[in-house]
Image: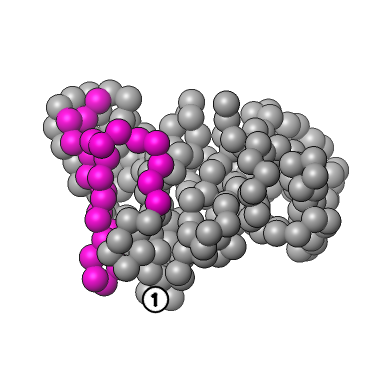
Amino acid sequence: QKEVEQNSGPLSVPEGAIASLNCTYSDRVSQSFFWYRQYSGKSPELIMSIYSNGDKEDGRFTAQLNKASQYVSLLIRDSQPSDSATYLCAVNYPGGYQKVTFGTGTKLQVIP
Amino acid sequence: KAGVTQTPRYLIKTRGQQVTLSCSPISGHRSVSWYQQTPGQGLQFLFEYFSETQRNKGNFPGRFSGRQFSNSRSEMNVSTLELGDSALYLCASATSGGHQETQYFGPGTRLLVL
């Protein structure tokens, strides 16, 4: 059983719309959550990190975390064609060390 | 500050051979993690090194090994290559590897096993 689940997509949204990307995780002890963006042929780059329940906003991006439901999401407002990429949800565990588990990613297509 | 660098960027090997990949972290970063990315399995954690010690290991066979040097540079080795080892191998560095720290990824080494 995969530990981090994402819908593979593609998720298609028109330019200017809100894109909603979802991720569920299975291990309740997970404490750190990350969203990475990966363009085709490139390496992942961090967009947002979130550690506490609730919302965290950074520009057009909002990460939402609900630990009770083991659910984390990423909202992209005013989507742009340049946002077209694969979005990876990642989860890390307490203990002080890096042992990050990634979902397989959701491919987002923003249609001009 | 220079980013994470990986060499070589592309590699073609045949089954049964071995390969060594290199990763130089961002200056001052002491934690280096390695990942394998394939279309079917996504990004999978291989291992993480800090101060020349392996602190965490993923679920990969013993053919996959790594090490870290005193300057934090890291290498990973894959022995007895199999076709299924064809993948993009990414390394990522972090300051000390705390679970809330951001990892910064290198450009990756694309390995093709024939």
Q: Chain of mark 1?
A: B
Query: Which residue is tagged 1?
Result: B28
Q: Is residue B114 visible?
A: yes
Mark 1: amino acid = Gly
- The part of the image, by quadrant, that contains residue A105 is top right
Q: Judging from the image, what secondary structure is the residue with disc 1 in?
A: loop
Is the residue B113 above or below the residue B73 in the image?
above
Q: Quadrant of the C terminus of chain B?
A: top left
Residue B97 appears at what percent x and percent y?
A: 47, 64
Q: Is residue B87 left or right of residue A91?
A: left
Q: Is residue B62 magenta?
A: yes
Q: Is residue A60 visible?
A: no
Residue in view at x 81 percent, y 37 percent = A14
Q: Colour mode?
A: one colour
Residue in view at x 68 percent, y 44 percent = A28
Q: Is residue A85 left or right of residue A54?
A: left
Residue A91 appears at what percent x and percent y?
A: 60, 48
Q: Nearer the viewer, residue A7 or B57?
A: B57
Is the residue B24 above or below the residue A105 in the image?
below
Q: Nearer the viewer, residue A52 or A28?
A: A28
Graded by Cα atoms within 10 Å as few (under 14), some (14 to 19) or many (20 or more), the crowding at tag 1 reads: few
Residue that sits furthest to the left in the current view: B17
Residue in view at x 32 percent, y 68 percent = B51
Residue in view at x 35 percent, y 35 percent = B60
Q: Is residue B20 left or right of residue A27?
A: left
- The part of the image, by quadrant, that contains residue B89 is top left
Q: Which residues are magenta?
A: B56-82
